[in-house]
Image (cartoon, rainbow, N blue to C red):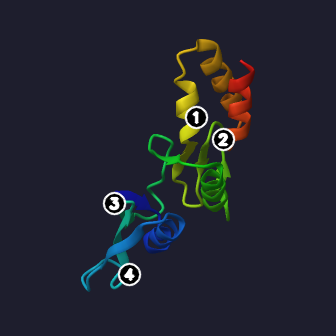
Amino acid sequence: MLVVRSSAEEAANFYVSTFENSRILDITRYGEDAPGDMAGRVLTVTFQIHGLDFTALNGGPTFKFTEAISFVVDCDSQAEVDHLWDTLTANGGEESQCGWLKDKYGLSWQIVPTLLFKLMSDPNPAKAGAVTQAMLQMRKIDTRLLQEAYDKA
């Protein structure tokens, strides 16, 4: 379950618009007996991304995301890395190191090209190490620079 401060529906709509093969499954609302002015407001939103179900909960300002939870997205191409990186860091998202970022809701993501895992698992330690060192210098992973480091090693 994703605990979003007060915009579970907005966050779920953002995620399903960002990832292909995604959709909203269900929205539940607070009942008439809810505290304060919560009656009728969104409580949870259940949505699906590539066959995986998630539930976002309007948890209020007390609950915040940390890097203890992150989603890894395995990307087939640099174009996919670029699209997801740009979309998830837009409007208040934050870049970090080695393919990590936080979106505008504070959720951590690792946007990683498949090529990175392939090159880093090469049995030649010099090649794998060169790729690792190149990756450690990056924010958004650049497959061209990874391949160059691999080829030079």
> In what quadrant of the picture does the N terminus appear?
bottom left
Q: Mark 4 points at which residue?
A: 41
- Marks 3 and 4, Cα distance to the nearest angstrom? 27 Å
Q: Quadrant of residue 50?
A: bottom left
Residue sitting at x 66%, y 54%: 82
- Marks 1 and 2, Cα distance to the nearest angstrom? 8 Å
Residue 7 location, x and y as percent? 48, 71
Residue sitting at x 24%, y 82%: 33
Residue 139 location, x and y as percent? 69, 41
Q: Classify mark 2: helix, strand or loop.
A: loop
- Please report contact status of discs 3 and 2: CB closer than 8 Å, yes or no: no
| Three-letter code, disc 1 | Leu
Q: Would you say 109 lies left or right of 91 here?
A: left
Foreground label between 3 and 4: 3
Question: Local crowd at mark 3 within 10 Å, few (<14), some, or many (≥20)?
Answer: few
Label 4 vs 2, first from the N-terminus: 4
- Please report contact status of discs 1 and 2: CB closer than 8 Å, yes or no: yes
Q: Name the residue under label 3.
A: 51
